[in-house]
Amino acid sequence: MKVLLISIVLLVSALTTVYSLAAVVQRRQDNQVPATCDEARAEVARFGDALSEWGSGKGGDAWRSSKFTSAEGETFWEGFNFYKSESRFKKAVRQINEDMEGVIGRKPIFDDNGREVGQRIVKETRVDGKTSSVLIQLITPRSIHGIRAPSLGLALTVEKARITCQVEAGRNTN
């Protein structure tokens, strides 16, 4: 009887531990962003393999696109477009702003003096009611920075690790 009772207790505690671990993993997958820059950087560091391309478009506008892949096969993309021509930049921004499909967030970007210097747009693509892709676009003078990931949580984590934390670190060094 004692052996049976001990076995049941061990089984229940093992299931509780596994459930707790699964809950933590599930929360991370369900759009939770790491609380600290170190956690965000560690999460993004899992995506060590990068395939990058760069070139120039119409009028010599520079672009770069990188695809990052984890050992588990997860991927995210990061891209930059830098516009030499103000008119081509304004046209690209107008097209982004007119395409309202899937927009789940839009807010202005401000500099350290409180002056509006751009905008941040978050778009979600859904297939059969589930998120299949999230695109974060950061539009600043003559440049568009994009992050595409399969989930909002991963996209926000990449944004935090590669943009937000770098900006904060730059402010702290002055």
Image (cartoon, rainbow, N blue to C red):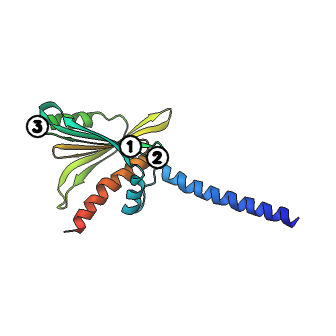
Q: Earlier in the sequence, mark 3 or mark 2?
A: 2
Residue at image coords 20%, 36%: 55
Q: Nearer the viewer, mark 1 or mark 3?
A: 1
Q: Which residue is mark 1?
A: 76
Amino acid carrying mark 1 in the image = Phe
Which of the 4 image quadrants contains residue 126? top left
Amino acid carrying mark 3 in the image = Ser
Q: Nearer the viewer, mark 3 or mark 2?
A: 2
Classify 20 as above or below 77.
below
Residue at image coords 19%, 44%: 143
Amino acid carrying mark 2 in the image = Ala
Q: Which residue is mark 3?
A: 85
Mark 2 is surrounded, within 10 Å at the Cα level, by few (under 14), some (14 to 19) or many (20 or more) other residues, namely few
Q: Nearer the viewer, mark 1 or mark 2?
A: 2
Q: Which residue is mark 2?
A: 71
Q: Which residue sits furthest right?
A: 1
